[in-house]
Image (cartoon, grey):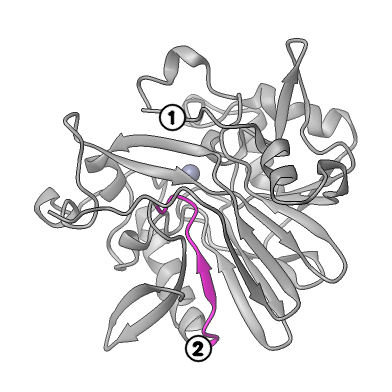
Amino acid sequence: MKQVQYFEGRATVRIGRISVTTLLDGWLSLDGGAMYGIVPKTLWEQQLPADDRNRVRMAMRPLLVQTPTNTLVIESGLGQAVAPELHERYGIDRKGPLLGELVRAAGIEPDAVDTVACTHLHWDHSGGLCRLRDGNYEPTFAKATYVAQRGEWEIATKPSNLHKASYTPASLTPIEQRGQLRLVEGNAEIVPGVRFEFNGGHTENHAVIWLQDQGQSGCFLGDLVPTASHVPLAWISAYDINAGGSFHARESLYPKLVATQAQCFFYHEPEYPVRRMLQSGSRFLAAPVS
Ligand SMILES: [Zn+2]
């Protein structure tokens, strides 16, 4: 059985003049069968061992990004959006500070964050966008513009029965009420050098986020590829609303990651989260960036 080297620290890398730091909001443990979809346990447990309740332990790693023109946070951890009575079910382990303090600990004042973006708005990705103050949610970053895909925002803030277990609208709507929301559709620039590439698949409106400067590239993969162990094309989570869409999105994206030698950021990766995609024939592998 593989010995997992859980990575508790921050990793900082450069993409041209862009600095990217991975933060750690905490951990969650989800059912391994759900996380690996059709993949048999005999295969996936060689990558991430299951605990005594068949769960795999995964990180939540928002990014702090400084470009020549902007200071961004990408993804937000789960913050306070999940009621404490549900923490046991999801194996939530987040005893550390909230996102604003994580940013401050990395050397940036929260009020200096001017832009926030998410690949999608599932609660484990968007729960830290707002924080509780006196029982009410308010945006974690008071001076930031929050950029989201329009379709994702509409589903997340008015979820149907199909979607309501995946979203926490109360921790999102204050962003719009405070006038801090900017909605985009499809492939769209977030700030210069940072852009959405629309994928669908995991959610109807999932979009990975590319970072590019001076001929160098990075890509934050969100839940299209939640951990490095999910890189094989068919290793798709059962949480994906459209597994076939995820498969085709990966087929389209991976060659671009290889061709640009992009540094790939894996939000849920329990080990070192910054990797490079390598191709051998029709197979792909994410190797740690040294
Ligand atoms: Zn998700």
**249 above or below 24?**
below
In this picture, residue 109 sits left or right of residue 61 = right
Q: Which residues are magenta?
A: 259-269
**285 above or below 9?**
below
Residue under the image location 33 percent in, 36 percent down: 30
The mark nearer the N terminus, 2 or 1, is 1
**How busy is the neighbourhood of tag 1: few (under 14 within 10 Å), some, or many (20 plus)?**
some
Q: Which mark is residue 259?
A: 2
Displayed quadrant of residue 276: bottom left
Residue under the image location 22 percent in, 42 percent down: 33
- Amino acid, disc 2: Ala
- Which quarter shows the C terminus? bottom left
Which of the two discs, 2 and 1, sits closer to the camera? 1
In this picture, residue 218 sits left or right of residue 247 = right
Q: Is residue 100 magenta?
A: no
Q: Is residue 265 magenta?
A: yes
Residue under the image location 87 percent in, 49 percent down: 112
Residue under the image location 40 percent in, 47 percent down: 240
Q: Which mark is residue 93?
A: 1
> Toward the viewer: 80 or 234?
80
Q: In this view, which residue lies farthest toward the left?
A: 42
